[in-house]
Image (cartoon, helix red, strand yellow):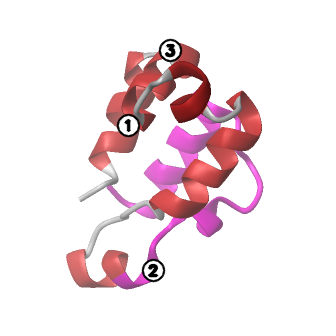
Amino acid sequence: MNFPTFVKGMKKHFKITDGVNRYVDNLLTLWRNKIIIDLGDFEDWLKSQIGDYILAEGLCMREAIEKHYGTSASKFIEKTVW
């Protein structure tokens, strides 16, 4: 996935339009030659939007994304993990 596709996906699935580069792991992205998401920063954002899904709902990140944003959003994030 290239950066413009990542930006479009973040906007489409999560309504994130500003500072999208904050969610890119620059070192892994350079190493893998494709966009790799910084899961720590994304999880911080996700918890700020839906609360602590682990403690409150007993969900993993994928399940929380599917519940609150849909399956297509979850699959989008999966493509940026590794």
| Amino acid bearing label 3 | Lys
Q: For residue 79, which quarter of the picture?
A: top left
**Residue 16 magenta:** yes
Query: Badge 1 local density, few (<14 within 10 Å), some, or many (20+)?
Result: some
Gap between marks 3 and 1, in whole Å? 14 Å
5 sits to left or right of 7: left
38 sits to left or right of 76: right
Say which quadrant the C terminus sits in.
bottom left
Label 3 vs 1, first from the N-terminus: 3
**Residue 10 magenta:** yes
Q: Position of residue 16 (x, y in %)?
A: 70, 43
Gap between marks 2 and 3, in whole Å? 28 Å
Query: Residue beneath label 3, please?
Result: 67
Query: Helix, strand, or loop for circle 3?
Result: helix
Say which quadrant the N terminus sits in.
bottom left
Query: Residue beneath label 2, please?
Result: 26
Gap between marks 1 and 2, in whole Å? 18 Å
Furthest residue to the front? 55
**Residue at image x 38%, y 60%?**
2
| Amino acid bearing label 2 | Asn
Query: Badge 3 local density, few (<14 within 10 Å), some, or many (20+)?
Result: few
Magenta-highlighted residues: 1-27
